[in-house]
Image: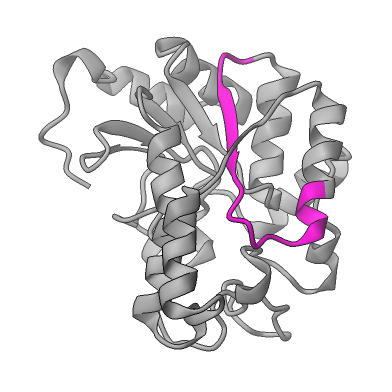
Amino acid sequence: MDYGLKPKALMFTEQQIQDIENASLAEAIEIVSKQFPQETVFSTSLGQEDQVLTHVIARNNLPVKIFTLDTGRLFYEHYELLEKTNARYKTNIQVYFPEAADVEQFVNEKGVNAFFESVENRKQCCFIRKVKPLNRALQGAKVWITGLRADQSDNRKEMKMLEWDDARQLYKFNPLIHWTYEQMIDYIKENNIPYNPLHDKGFISIGCAPCTRAIEPGEDARAGRWWWEVSHKECGLHVNS
């Protein structure tokens, strides 16, 4: 992250940053979203972390646009949860899809499951199905809320709650960055938040169906993502993490 190139019009003061870091979850999101009420967006994958944030945003009627990415290769349970979430919170989570021409070219040139063949192919598939739609969804935004937690992976441990994403020219706000897995699960139970039933079957981090498996006891939480390769277990959405 580059902290030296923030446009002055977008800057949070040191006091605001301190207030955000010391606030409760709902208060922190409120402070940020009211700073940029029409330009704060939240990208949800409908994972457990993101369901917590959807609950807080909806229950407190915060001015945050919620959207999700449909890669075209998701689990059926994902779509059921999307419907259940919209019904529960009276939301209309906006869905962004990959460009059909990009998917057609990739599949026709390399094969429908070419991501199994190399890390390069897998990253290209992720770029087409996730990164490009995300970039389109973020156009015009000044704050991007994520459900990242520091203990999800080694390369997320150094992330801050509020940081500048120079590549996309916006603030990246990670309100759950210091939450533990146990804290998140307790919050879900206490508030009866709907979640994907695959989580109860060992699918801790859920992505596309072909690229996700349940993890074994003692395995890293992201071991089930792109389980056939040795990599940093990232798809490119969080390019600087």
Q: Nearer the viewer, residue 106 or 156?
A: 106
Image quadrant in which you'd find residue 209: bottom right
Counting from the top left corner in percent of width and height, residue 136 is at 40, 36
* Residue 234 seen by the camera: no
Tag count in the figure?
Answer: 0
Residue at 57% across / 83% down in the picture?
Answer: 227
Viewer-nearest residue: 200 or 134: 134
The percent coordinates of residue 194 (x first, y second) are: 84, 43
Q: Is residue 48 left or right of residue 16?
A: right
Q: Check the image and report above or below for 226 versus 172.
A: below
Q: Residue furthest front?
A: 108
Give the left or right position of residue 167, taking residue 21 as reference: left
Occupied quadrant, residue 207: bottom right
Instruction: Examine the structure image and report whether residue 105 is included in the region drawn in magenta.
Output: no
Tell me which residue sits at (22%, 47%) in the image.
1
Q: Nearer the viewer, residue 223 or 184?
A: 223
Residue drawn 71% across the image and 42% down it: 51
Does the magenta run of residues contain 72? yes
Residue found 81% across the figure and 21% down from its top: 90
User: What percent of the width, then of the height, locates residue 81?
Assistant: 81, 46
Residue 92 as seen in the image, left or right of residue 200: left
Q: Is residue 91 above or below residue 145?
A: above
Q: Is residue 110 visible?
A: yes
- Taking the image as shown, residue 21 lies to the left or right of residue 152, namely left
Instruction: Tell me residue 171's x, y (percent).
Output: 33, 32
Note whether 227 is above or below 124 in the view shown: below
Region rendered in magenta:
62-79
Color style of the picture: one colour
The quarter of the picture where the C terminus appears is bottom left
